[in-house]
Amino acid sequence: MTGRRYLLAFTDEQVAYAEQVGAACRAVWNTALEQRREYRRRGGFIGYVEQARQMAEAKKDPHCAWLADAPSHTLQQTLRDVDRACRTHGTWRVRWRSKSRTAPSFRFPDPHQIAVRRLSRRWGEVRLPKFGAVRFRWTRPLGGATRSATVSRSGGRWHISRVHGRNRRSGRRDAVRAQLGRLHARIRDRRADFAARTAVRLVRHHGTVVVEDLRIRNMTASAKGTIERPGRNVRQKAGLNRAILAKGWGGFLLRLEQVARYHGAQVVKIDPAYTSQTCNACTHVARESRESQAVFRCVACGHQDNADVNAAKNILAAGLAVTGRGDLAVGRSVKRQPPERLAA
């Protein structure tokens, strides 16, 4: 959806009526907002449907005849705008519309009530409910079918903003999108095939498969933070999140559990805490032992191994300790410590 703005050439009567409609919409906005806040103070809630019903009843009151003078769709759209603002920002953060500081504006949401035609090279005409025919400066093409129109005052002049659909499509862009779709589908198929083949190979040759119980959702959480406390290294964290999700850990674990039940194997999940900082030879835990992403050298006994291999040995030992006690899930076990190693 895109919009284009045009300068209106109101007559004096239309200017007075536009001011009247803007004032009615401002009064509806403030009344609806105050009503919502009063309901909140009393622990209740009122929404658009009930407020629209009450506004329809108020039009029948002789003291509120000015509501009936304005186009009904503009008042209903004002109630919808209040509802959307309260849901987005909260009832207490939505601002009042001031007569002196807020420029009058109102929207016609029904495209069937908006008719546009061109009069000359520089002028066009739009028909609005209860306004009749209004001339406007034709400064640019319309750009598509009208979806809605907003009339507003700015700098003492009145404008109309048309919202229309994007009717221009590029054949080359559609072709590129189709190519990207086929490429991503091929990537998904290859990832699923790798997960299935690897899972079947593991459970066919091993009765027990031990994995880390990783919290993937927490690991790939966004680092943007909030307005009060913005995050740090957001781009780096976003790249790490994409790399983790691209590996398909969750899908592989799901496939592994499925084929394990079919082949009679068992999948054991263990707590991943300190598995990469624990020495598999002496069980000493130290962050300094992990010299790099690939090198592990124990600061206590001097044992050296590939960091991933050392962590895998710790994961396997913890999993075998769990299965040795007859418990297939760390979450259901009360004995978390593995048995003491026997002296050589």
Image (cartoon, helix red, strand yellow):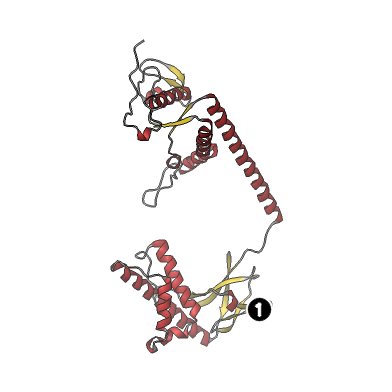
Q: Nearer the viewer, residue 92 or 234?
A: 92
Figure quadrant of residue 311: top left
Residue at the limit of the structure toward the left, as seen here: 42
In the picture, which quadrant includes the C terminus?
Answer: top left
Residue at x 40%, y 62% (from the top left corner): 89
In the image, residue 63 sits, relative to residue 122, either above or below, namely below
Q: Position of residue 316 (x, y in %)?
A: 44, 24
In the picture, which quadrant includes the N terminus?
Answer: bottom right
- Left or right of residue 15, residue 82 in this image: left
**Residue 63 visible in the displayed image:** yes
Q: Position of residue 73 (x, y in %)?
A: 50, 77
Residue at x 32%, y 28% (from the top left corner): 335
Q: Position of residue 132 (x, y in %)?
A: 57, 85
Q: Nearer the viewer, residue 50 or 300?
A: 50
Residue at the limit of the structure toward the bottom, as seen here: 62
SS state under label 1: strand
Residue at x 49%, y 40% (from the top left corner): 241
Q: Which residue is mark 1?
A: 117
Q: Total number of numbered labels?
A: 1
Q: Position of residue 214 (x, y in %)?
A: 43, 36
Badge 1 local density, few (<14 within 10 Å), some, or many (20+)?
few
- Left or right of residue 29, residue 132 in this image: right
Figure quadrant of residue 131: bottom right
Residue at x 42%, y 62% (from the top left corner): 88
**Residue 161 visible in the displayed image:** no
Residue at the limit of the structure toward the top, as seen here: 344
- Amino acid bearing label 1: Arg
